[in-house]
Image: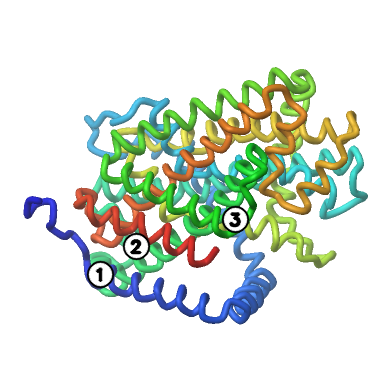
Amino acid sequence: MTKTALRSTILLPVFLPAVVIILLLVIGTISNPELAGQVFSVTLKWITETFGWFYMLSVAIFLVFIVCVAASSWGNIKLGPDHAQPQYSFAEWFAMLFSAGYGVALLYFGVAEPVLHYASPPAGAAETVDAAKQAMQIAFFHWGFHIWAIYGIVGLVLAYFAFRHGLPLSIRSALYPLIGDKIYGPIGHTVDVFAILGTLFGIATTLGLSVTQINAGLHYLWPSIPINTTVQITAIAIITAAATLSVVAGMDKGVKRLSIVNMTLAVSLMAFVFFIGPTIHILESFLQNTGSYLSGIVERTFNLQAYSRSDWIGNWTLFIFGWTIAWAPFVGMFIAKISRGRTIRQFVVGVMLVPTIFTFLWFSVFGDTALNLIMNEGFNTLITDVQANQAVALFQLFEVLPLSFIISLLTVILIITFFVTSSDSGSLVIDSLASGGNINTPAWQRVFWAVLEGAVAAVLL
C-alpha cells in the first residue's frame, strides 16, 4: 500500500472529541439500558414541551426564507464560478439527493403512517372518512416542503460559501459572516463535532428502522427466518460491508450508481402498485390531498395543539422534524457537494419541488391504496398488524396484491440499497467534517466511519 493511500486528512480537534463522545454515549447506554431509556424519554418530553414552538417556528422561517431567496434576483447566482457547469445530469442529481435524503423513510412510513393516523387521528373520530382525509394531509405535511426546506437551507448555505467563496465544505463555513476567520478555531471545531454526532446517530437510528423492516420482509418471504435481534444485527453487518465497498468505490462509481438503481426500483414498485391498485382513486386523492395540503399549510405549520395537550405532536410532527434537523448537516452537505454549477433558483426548485411531488405521489399510491383496502374492501386486519409492528405495513399491503412474493423481495432489496446509499454518503460527509471540510480523503478513513455507523446501530439495537 502506498504512502498516499495511508495518508491522513483527519483534523484531530474535531475527530477526537467526536469519537470520544460517541463511545461514551454508546458505553453509557449499553451499561444501563433502562436508565438510558428513561433519561432519553424525559429529555425528549422536556424538549417537546419547552421548545416545540421554537422547532415549528424555525422550520417555518427556513421555508419562507429559501423560497424568497429563490424568487429574488439572488436566484440567478451560481453555486460556483460564473462559468461552472453542473457535474451531474438532473436525473443523476435528483436520484442522489433523494436516495440520501429519505428514501428509507418513505418505504417505512408510506403505508404505516396513513394507516396509524386513520386509526388514531390527533382530532376527531377514528376510522371515518374525515380521519382518512386527515391521515393523508398529515402525511403530506410531515414529508412535504418543510423537511426539504431544512435540508435545502443547509445545502444552499454550504454550497454558496464553499463554491462561491472558497471556504471549506463544512458546517463551520455557515458561521463565516458572523465570526469570520474564527471558524478555523475552537468555535468551528465545536460546530463540526455536533454535526458529526447528529449525522452518525441519525444514520444509526435510520439503520435501526431499516433492519426491522428488512427482518419483517425476510420473515414474510421465508417464515422460517425469525424476527429477532440476531437477524437484525446480521443485516446491519451485511449492509455495513456493502456500504464499505461502495465507500471505497467513491462518489461516481458508488453513490451515483446505487442511487440510479434505487430510483429505478422505487419508480417500478410505485408504478406496479399504481396500475394494480385503485388507479383512478389514487389520481383523485393525489389532486385532492395536494390541494388540501397547499390550502392548509399555514394553519398546520403553526398548530401546536396548544388548547388540547397530548403526546401526538411530540411523537409525530416534532419527532420527524427533529429527525430531519439531525440529518440536515449530513444531507445538506451531501446535496451541496453534488450541486456545484447550478444556480440558486435551480437548486431550490430541484431540492424543494421535485422530491415533494414524488413524495406526494408515493403516499397517494401506497397510503391511499391501503386506506381503500381498509375502508372499501374490509381489510381491517391491516390496522391491527401495523399497530403491532409498523415495519410489516408495506408487506401486509403486498399480501393482497398479485405477485406479492416478487414485489416483497424487490422491496427488501430496495430497502437495503437505499440504506447502503445513505450509509455510504453519510460516511463521505462525516469524513469530510472530521477532516476540516477536505473532500479528497483516503478510503480507509471513510471505511472507518462506515464501520462505526454499523457498530453504533448494532450496539443500540
Q: In the drawing, does residue 436 fall left or right of residue 125? A: left
Label of residue 182 in the image: 1
The residue labelled by disc 3 is 321
Residue 432 seen anywhere in this rendered image of the structure = no
Label 2 close to label 1 by CB (< 8 Å): yes
The answer for how far apart the CA atoms under marks 1 and 3 are is 30 Å
Q: In which quarter of the image is the C terminus?
A: bottom right
Q: Is residue 346 above or below residue 178?
A: above
Residue in the foreground of this view, choosing between 4 and 341? 4
Secondary structure under tag 1 reads helix
Secondary structure under tag 3 reads helix
Residue in the foreground of this view, choosing between 375 and 320? 375
Callout 2 amino acid: Leu
The residue labelled by disc 2 is 175
What residue do we see at 37% from left, 61% from top? 452
Label of residue 57 in the image: none
N-terminal-most mark, 1 or 3: 1
Q: Is residue 273 above or below residue 14?
A: above
Q: Is residue 449 above or below residue 279?
A: below
Residue 210 seen anywhere in this rendered image of the structure = yes
What residue do we see at 35% from left, 70% from top? 18
Secondary structure under tag 2 reads helix
